[in-house]
Amino acid sequence: MTTTTPSSSLTRPGAVDGQGIDAGVPAHYGDPMGEQRRLLGADALVDLSHRGLVRVTGPDRLTWLHSMTTQKLDDLAPHHGVETLVLSPHGHVEHAIHVVDDGESSWLGVEPGTADALVQWLTSMQFMLRVQVTDVSADFAQFGQVCDEAGSAEQYAADGTLVWVDPWPTMGPDTASYSGDGPHPATGRRWREVIVPRDRAADFVGDRPLSGTLAAEALRVADWRPRLGADTDHRSIPHELDWLRTAVHLHKGCYRGQETVARVHNLGRPPRRVVFLHLDGSGHLLPEPGAQLRVPGVERPVGVITTVARHHEDGPIALAVVKRSTPTDVDLVADDCAAAQTVIVTP
């Protein structure tokens, strides 16, 4: 597993270390709700220095990455952020990659602890191509931020700082959505991730306030935004999470797992589907990720909660993955907590 320098943000007053995949950076600094509001106001940064970063250099880098992943990358413009997936031969999601190219190198942001595995797989696929793959997680820190209306990746690029701007939920030119026809709650989402050398991180942060990962996760859940390692398991395919909309190009060249993507898209619906939940917050405790969901009066579980968050306006919310056949017009139950579902992927 890739190791990185411990986050200096943990020494900030009130900082509380995160848990699970977000261990190693602050979950909050004592005021999670206030931190959400500051984050939404484009005032705060979120320390994401636990995320992995892989740099790919060489003249063949874009066509090479294009040939192995789900997104069209062969003509990727400099400083234009895109998302791509690495799938297993059976189409299950193995890596979710935030890609930005600076004209000389492609920078691949990945979930904590996954950079080493990605580097090993990419290196095994290098063959005779003119590419070089390097894990640079220890040399660069990443920070999440909600953009102000005037913010852009190009403004940061002018001073040499790299920025990945999240395309979610805007659909790509040749993809599909599995959600309904109504407005998407993430429309207008303004999330970006800034990449800075670790020895310049303190100068980049300066005196700006910091928000914890709990704030970022609450906004992500409210935006129905899937995350590898949080909302996925070893069986997850992109269709179940409505991930085709930003991460998959349906008519590009062959890549590992493409048969599953095409078959499910052309011939039927995915076996499971992601749902958004409003949780009953009247009790002292909320269900934990991994809690089984049931239809009231039915013993057999229909799904599992994947991410739980407390939103500053919506209260306790969650994402969950349920069987496709789960009724859409009933509230679900997890650990005696009522969960009102909103359909994301239509059954």
Image (tube, rainbow, N blue to C red):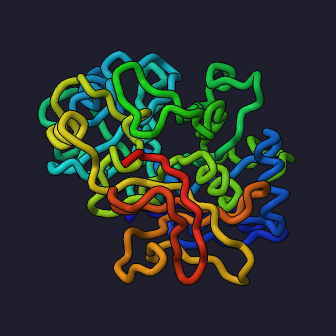
* Left or right of 207, for residue 346: left
Q: Position of residue 331 (x, y in %)?
A: 54, 66
| Image: 87 above or below 126 | below
Query: Quadrant location of residue 338?
Result: bottom right
Judging depth in this view, the residue of 329 and 58 nearest the camera is 329
Quarter of the image that includes the N terminus = bottom left
Residue drawn at (69%, 42%) of the image: 145
| Image: 269 above or below 164 | below
Residue drawn at (59%, 63%) of the image: 340
Q: Position of residue 224 (x, y in %)?
A: 55, 48
* Number of numbered discs overlaid on the protein picture: 0
Judging depth in this view, the residue of 262 and 255 nearest the camera is 262
* Left or right of 29, for residue 68: left
Query: Quadrant location of residue 204?
Result: top right
* Left or right of 188, for residue 168: left
Regarding residue 26, the answer to whether it shows in the image is: no
Q: Position of residue 182 (x, y in %)?
A: 55, 34
Regarding residue 102, the answer to whether it shows in the image is: yes
Residue drawn at (62%, 25%) of the image: 153
Q: Position of residue 162 (x, y in %)?
A: 58, 31
| Image: 194 above or below 95 | above
Residue drawn at (41%, 48%) of the image: 241
